[in-house]
């Protein structure tokens, strides 16, 4: 679907993110040139146009989903809710043949609290507007609205009697980048991994190591960041099913992001895992990152002039954590013991099925202080007692969610 006019003017949009990553998501949105309206528990609201929506969808590293605000209005009862919803010009956003589904309702400090009833009223009002005769704006025949197949998804947020109706433009959540076909047991979300790297303060000029790399999510997100590669280049979005879609704008934004990819930077990213199968899986995921990044050249049927133009992937070894070391052979095959960052996701008690096993591993992580002297350490785990088993109090700790799992992010300024 293509709309030559696109989304005229500016609208509010909302980026959903992990609780604890709101500031990081806000900073990303600002860097993409958009204005922050406000932020709250796991969400950031901002102003944007069609191009900005595509930039957010393709370029944000820490957002899980982007929603477009179809409309906002006060409502203290169901009559207000119906009238406000029916007033929104849904026909300029959604094709009637696409269908409409209210997928989520959230209420806070409002007189309207019956979520199932709210869902029913919003669906009825929007559907009748969509099915009304063109230009009439009246009540339409609901039988004209398909009940099966693809549907535009709407979320309802009511805060202090103010209703916000948000239209999903994302589709599959943004942590599904397209490079990871398998993730191993209880994998770290890509968006959470990206947030950890940014919260830890890692910059591409510093070495990075993950001694529990698993399927390689932290390494992959570090690589995407180091290449200045937009994380959403390997997938598409549900905005393409809506009337506001604009293929010309989408391709212009994609090409802009592709033009920024830089393979020439020195990449000092490495990792290890004690499980050989995980290392094999991690390397496969990293190769897919490289494949997505190379599409610009592949689409133009160009060949690299020199070997240096080919993407260099991080090195991963099959090693137990206590044998990992800051001295590894980097991509230039030169010894490197510069101080850097360890960012890692050690096995959770819930992942292992035995909290005592994870506590034993946390105690063994003291070896990192000997093998990575002077490095910074950033750890995410679901265990609130990590510090006591590791043997040192963290310099900073914050709560952050990895999907539905409440977790803790511990930071040590120097090992």
Image (tube, rainbow, N blue to C red):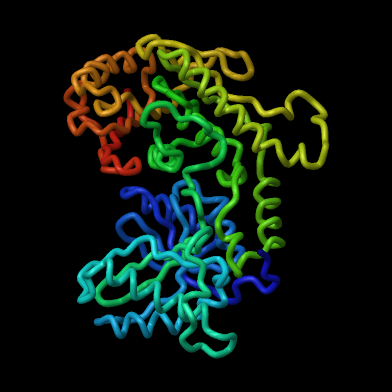
User: In the picture shown, does residue 89 fall above or below 17?
Assistant: below
Can the viewer see residue 268? yes
Residue 376 lies, in percent from the top left, at: 37, 28
* Residue 316 higher or lower than 290, as above or below: above
Q: Residue at x 44, y 51 (%)?
A: 63
Which of the image's four quarters has the N terminus? bottom right
Number of numbered discs: 0
Quadrant showing the C terminus: top left
- Asked whether residue 46 appears in the rendered view, the answer is no
The one nearer the camera, 102 or 112, is: 102
**Residue 65 horizontal/vertical position (percent):** 45, 54
Q: Nearer the viewer, residue 127 or 255?
A: 127
Please tell me which residue is depicted at 31% across the width and 13% down the height of the picture. 367
> Is residue 262 shown left or right of residue 326?
right
- The percent coordinates of residue 75 (x first, y second) are 29, 81
**Is residue 306 shown left or right of residue 173?**
right
Name of the residue lying farthest toward the front: 143
């Amino acid at each position: 679907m293509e709309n030559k006019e696109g989304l005229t003017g500016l609208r509010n949009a909302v980026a959903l993110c992990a609780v604890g990553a709101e500031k990081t998501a806000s900073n990303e949105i600002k860097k993409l040139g958009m204005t922050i309206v406000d932020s709250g528990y796991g969400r950031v609201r901002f102003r944007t146009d069609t191009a900005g929506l595509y930039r957010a969808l393709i370029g944000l590293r820490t957002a899980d989903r982007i929603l477009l605000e179809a409309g906002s209005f006060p409502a203290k009862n169901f009559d207000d809710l119906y009238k406000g919803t029916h007033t929104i010009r849904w026909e300029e956003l959604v094709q009637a043949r696409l269908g409409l589904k209210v997928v989520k309702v959230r209420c806070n400090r409002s007189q309207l609290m019956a979520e199932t009833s709210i869902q029913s009223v919003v669906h009825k009002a929007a559907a009748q507007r969509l099915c009304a005769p063109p230009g009439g704006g009246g009540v339409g025949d609901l039988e004209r609205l398909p009940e099966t197949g693809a549907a535009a998804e709407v979320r309802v947020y009511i805060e202090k009697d103010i209703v916000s109706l948000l239209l999903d433009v994302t589709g599959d959540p943004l942590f599904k980048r397209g490079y990871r076909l398998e993730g191993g047991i209880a994998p770290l979300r890509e968006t959470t991994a990206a947030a950890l790297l940014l919260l830890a303060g890692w910059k591409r000029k510093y070495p990075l190591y993950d001694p529990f790399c698993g399927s390689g999510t932290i390494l992959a997100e570090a690589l995407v960041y180091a290449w200045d590669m937009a994380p959403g280049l390997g997938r598409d979005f549900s905005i393409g099913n809506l009337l506001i879609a604009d293929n010309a704008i989408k391709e212009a934004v994609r090409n802009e992001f592709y033009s920024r990819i830089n393979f020439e930077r020195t990449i000092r990213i490495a990792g290890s895992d004690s499980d050989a199968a995980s290392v094999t899986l991690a390397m496969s995921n990293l190769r897919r990152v490289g494949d997505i990044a190379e599409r610009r050249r592949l689409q133009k049927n160009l060949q690299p002039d020199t070997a240096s133009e080919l993407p260099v992937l991080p090195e991963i070894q099959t090693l137990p954590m206590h044998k990992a070391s800051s001295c590894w052979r980097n991509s230039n095959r030169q010894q490197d013991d510069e101080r850097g960052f360890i960012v890692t996701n050690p096995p959770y008690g819930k992942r292992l099925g035995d909290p005592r096993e994870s506590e034993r591993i946390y105690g063994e992580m003291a070896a990192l202080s000997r093998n990575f002297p002077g490095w910074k350490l950033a750890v995410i785990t679901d265990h609130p007692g990590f510090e006591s088993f590791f043997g040192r109090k963290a310099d900073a700790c914050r709560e952050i969610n990895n999907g539905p799992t409440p977790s803790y992010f511990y930071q040590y300024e120097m090992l």
